């Protein structure tokens, strides 16, 4: 098993509006710095927090599939397809399948925390189709129990959220006891520790650590107390060339 732990201090940093919104980025853009570059079909991952209520103005996207997961607080999104502001609350998820092009803006209320994750699909296909934009409420996602552990399936069996980008699954876990997640030799687990501490694959982890686990029979999480983790499961081999591959900005 290959395990990498990337602490918050080793991640890229970003900010909007003179520090009104601050970001740590487990997977940043090439110019952002940080220890990790895009891998598999994961292109970008940022944790954004609003120090005060602040708006990121209208800006374009094309090709990529961009997800916003509301971890805390409230946000609002605007897009050029619907031309209205739509609210999202804690636990809600929004997806931009940016296709041939779309513009959007976002407002984070004070104290709001989100993950924004960009997936790198087969652009030879996605650039040919119109953009779509969907919101999902926290109650839309199935919850599974694994002993004392709780899994919210965000992309996977029973979830209404689907992407063109495949293969891919995403879950959020509330871990109260040892949890073993089975994986195979051609899979990569990308794990963000939202809260708590413990060990993942025998490596000590703390809040805001990012973990990449490859070539494992399983990934074992042992919490010191309750842990809140976010898991993106990826394939190490894809059936298409990603944008990151073509632009030579891989990890």
Image (tube, grey):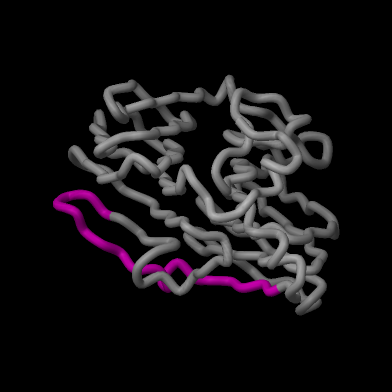
Q: Looking at the picture, how far across and down is residue 174, in whole percent?
A: 31, 48
Q: Quadrant of residue 24?
A: top right
Q: Viewer-proximal residue, 185 or 78? A: 185
Position above or below: 251 against 230: above
Q: Looking at the picture, how far across and down is residue 95, in whole percent?
A: 61, 65
Whether the magenta-drawn stretch holds residue 4 is answered as: no
Position above or below: 99 against 186: below
Position above or below: 144 against 233: below
On the question of residue 122 being in view, the answer is yes
Point 67% across, 72% down: residue: 133
Position above or below: 92 against 177: below
Point 31% across, 43% down: residue: 184
Q: Quadrant of residue 139?
A: bottom left
On the question of residue 194 being in view, the answer is no
Left or right, 28 with respect to 141, comes to: right
Q: Looking at the picture, how far across and down is residue 141, in whole percent?
A: 40, 68
Quadrant containing the N terminus is top left
Point 51% across, 51% down: residue: 71
Point 81% across, 67% down: residue: 101
Left or right, 183 with respect to 31, comes to: left
Range of the magenta residues?
Answer: 132-150
Q: Looking at the picture, how far across and down is residue 120, in whole percent?
A: 64, 52
Q: Quadrant of residue 25?
A: top right
Number of numbered labels in the structure image: 0
């Amino acid at each position: 098993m290959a395990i990498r732990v990337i602490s918050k201090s080793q991640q890229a940093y970003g900010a909007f509006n003179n520090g009104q919104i601050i970001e740590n980025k487990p997977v940043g853009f090439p110019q952002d710095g940080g220890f990790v570059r895009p891998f598999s079909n994961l292109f970008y991952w940022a944790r954004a927090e609003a120090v005060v209520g602040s708006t990121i103005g209208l800006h374009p996207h094309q090709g990529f599939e961009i997800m916003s997961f509301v971890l805390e607080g409230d946000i609002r999104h605007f897009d050029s397809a619907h031309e209205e502001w739509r609210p999202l609350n804690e636990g809600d998820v929004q997806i931009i399948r940016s296709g041939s092009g779309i513009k959007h803006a976002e407002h984070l209320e004070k104290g709001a925390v989100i993950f924004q994750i960009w997936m790198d699909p087969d652009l030879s296909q996605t650039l040919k189709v119109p953009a779509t934009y969907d919101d999902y409420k926290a109650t839309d996602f199935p919850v599974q129990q694994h002993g004392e552990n709780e899994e919210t399936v965000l992309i996977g069996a029973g979830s209404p959220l689907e992407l063109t980008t495949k293969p891919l699954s995403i879950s959020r876990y509330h871990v109260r006891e040892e949890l073993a997640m089975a994986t195979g030799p051609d899979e990569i687990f990308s794990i963000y520790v939202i809260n708590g501490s413990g060990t993942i694959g025998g490596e000590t982890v703390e809040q805001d650590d990012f973990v990449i686990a490859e070539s494992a029979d399983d990934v074992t999480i042992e919490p010191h107390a309750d842990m809140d983790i976010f898991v993106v499961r990826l394939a190490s081999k894809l059936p298409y060339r990603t944008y990151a591959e073509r632009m030579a900005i891989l990890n």
